[in-house]
Image (cartoon, rainbow, N blue to C red):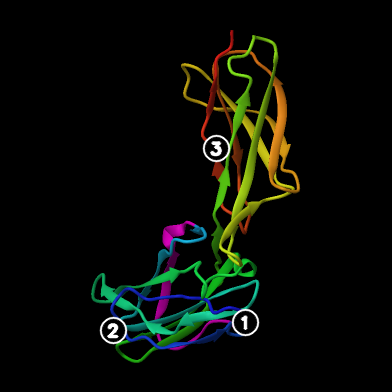
Amino acid sequence: MRKLAVGILLPCAVALSALTAPAAQAVSGNGDLKITKVSFNGGKSVVVGTTEKKTFILAITATDSSGINAAYSDIWSTATATGFGYHANLGCKAVNATTATCSMSYVMDPGYYGLENAQAGAWKAYLDISSKDHDAITQNWPNKFYVKRYAKLTADASPEPVRKGATLAVTGKLSRANWDDNAYHGYAGQSVKLQFRKAGTSTYTTVKTVTSSSTGALRTTVAASADGYWRYAFAGTTTTASATAAGDYVDTK
């Protein structure tokens, strides 16, 4: 397995080490220290293409009567249970005398020492929090967050213009980032919606659902009924981000 490049941008003490997912466990701790909130990338999936590094914030809010001293975190792919990560002291900022939010900035790198396709999907975090009066809590946080492969989608309607009532062919292609070779390849066997927006309106309506071919190609036919825009829309999966093609305008005579 190639190493997973996970980086730190916020000031803190950092030790880089090979990461194996901690064994599943219940919350272990003492005293009145509590973790009240954990946020991965603001609740959104981390979407990574083939070249650009992606940065996201892991933020932990915790409370204790004495205040929060420090927070540490590891992250890993649930599919592979291994990877590379930091067990690092997150930068903590006091909200008040008892509560603090501790934040760490991770970098997902699709380069040579980067992500692999097998690591797309659900990720989890191991948390280790301490308070100023030496209470401590460790936990495999139960909620998952998602690191997804970037997807591309195209649409082309023809002929243009088209006679009203005549057959209009709409072709396109669904592809997604391949982290193993840093290229885009067709995404086969996926349900993609063909949508239409009539000229002068602002809302797209789904006309039918098309399945991508073994190469990611899309093709279907419809009867041309009015001037407007045709596009394909893909909802995404647990491993791959959603994608929407730009609308292709067709003039109906």
Residue kind at label 3, given as amino acid type: Ala
- Residue density around tag 2, few if under 14, some if 14–19, many if 20 or more, within 10 Å: some
Is residue 70 highlighted in magenta? no
Residue kind at label 1, given as amino acid type: Ala
Q: Which residue is mark 2?
A: 66
| Residue occupying image coordinates x 63% and y 45% | 174
Which numbered disc, 2 or 3, marks the residue closer to the eye?
3
Q: Position of residue 212 (x, y in %)?
A: 72, 43
| Residue 165 vs residue 120, the one in the foreground | 165
Mark sitting on residue 112: none
Mark 1, secondary structure of its residue:
loop
Q: Quadrant of residue 96?
A: bottom left
Q: Quadrant of residue 170?
A: top right
Q: What's the CA distance linking mark 1 and mark 2?
A: 29 Å
Q: Which residue is mark 1?
A: 24
Q: Position of residue 245 (x, y in %)?
A: 55, 37
Mark sitting on residue 245: 3
Mark 3, secondary structure of its residue:
loop
Q: Which residues are magenta?
A: 24-44
Q: Find out whether the residues at labels 2 and 3 contact each other: C-beta distance under 8 Å.
A: no
- Residue density around tag 1, few if under 14, some if 14–19, many if 20 or more, within 10 Å: few
Mark 2, secondary structure of its residue:
loop
